[in-house]
Image: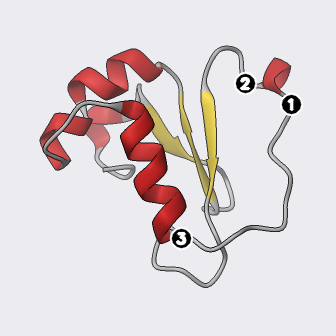
């Protein structure tokens, strides 16, 4: 879903491919999630990621740097790296 071009305005990889950025959480939840999951609940999506991805070392960027979006950091060595 992160690499799908039709959703690039809502979700995209960072330059190194180790995390992705969701720019509009509500639009992402209502548009993208139902296409891939049986729900449109963003909290459930994050919970599923947290259960699937091992703890990560880098700290997330400060909220002020995200401009209202959400940065999801993925664990190195998992299948979730770009």
Up-down relation of residue 61 to residue 68 (above or below) = below
Q: Earlier in the sequence, mark 2 or mark 3?
A: 2
Rate crowding at label 1 as few (under 14), some (14 to 19) or many (20 or more) other CA atoms within 10 Å.
few
The residue that mark 3 highlights is 81
> Residue 25: x percent and y percent?
45, 22
Q: Quadrant of residue 54?
A: bottom right
Mark in the foreground, 1 or 3: 1
> Residue 47: x percent and y percent?
47, 50
| SS under mark 3 | loop
| SS under mark 2 | loop
38 and 81: which one is in front?
Answer: 38
Disc 1/disc 2 C-alpha distance (Å)? 7 Å
Q: Which mark is residue 66?
A: 2
What residue do we see at 54% from left, 80% from top?
Answer: 78
What residue do we see at 18% from left, 48% from top?
Answer: 36
Rate crowding at label 3 as few (under 14), some (14 to 19) or many (20 or more) other CA atoms within 10 Å.
some
Colour mapping used in the image: secondary structure
**Apparent side of residue 9 relative to residue 40 in the rendered image (left or right):** right
Disc 1/disc 3 C-alpha distance (Å)? 22 Å
> Residue 62: x percent and y percent?
86, 30
What residue do we see at 68% from left, 61% from top?
Answer: 16
**Apparent side of residue 75 relative to residue 38 in the rendered image (left or right):** right
| SS under mark 1 | loop
Q: Which mark is residue 62?
A: 1
78 and 13: which one is in front?
Answer: 78
Disc 2/disc 3 C-alpha distance (Å)? 20 Å
Q: Quadrant of residue 67?
A: top right
> Residue 56: x percent and y percent?
74, 67
Up-down relation of residue 24 to residue 34 (above or below) = above
Rate crowding at label 2 as few (under 14), some (14 to 19) or many (20 or more) other CA atoms within 10 Å.
some
Residues under numbered marks 1 and 2 in contact, where contact means CB atoms less than 8 Å apart: yes
Q: Earlier in the sequence, mark 1 or mark 3?
A: 1
């Amino acid at each position: 879903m992160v690499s799908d071009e039709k959703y690039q305005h809502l979700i995209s990889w960072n330059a190194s491919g180790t995390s992705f950025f969701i720019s509009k959480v509500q639009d992402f939840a209502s548009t993208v999630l139902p296409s891939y999951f049986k729900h449109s609940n963003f909290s459930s999506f994050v919970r599923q990621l947290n259960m699937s991805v091992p703890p990560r070392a880098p700290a997330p960027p400060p909220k002020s740097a995200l401009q209202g979006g959400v940065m999801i950091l993925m664990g190195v060595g998992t299948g979730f790296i770009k």
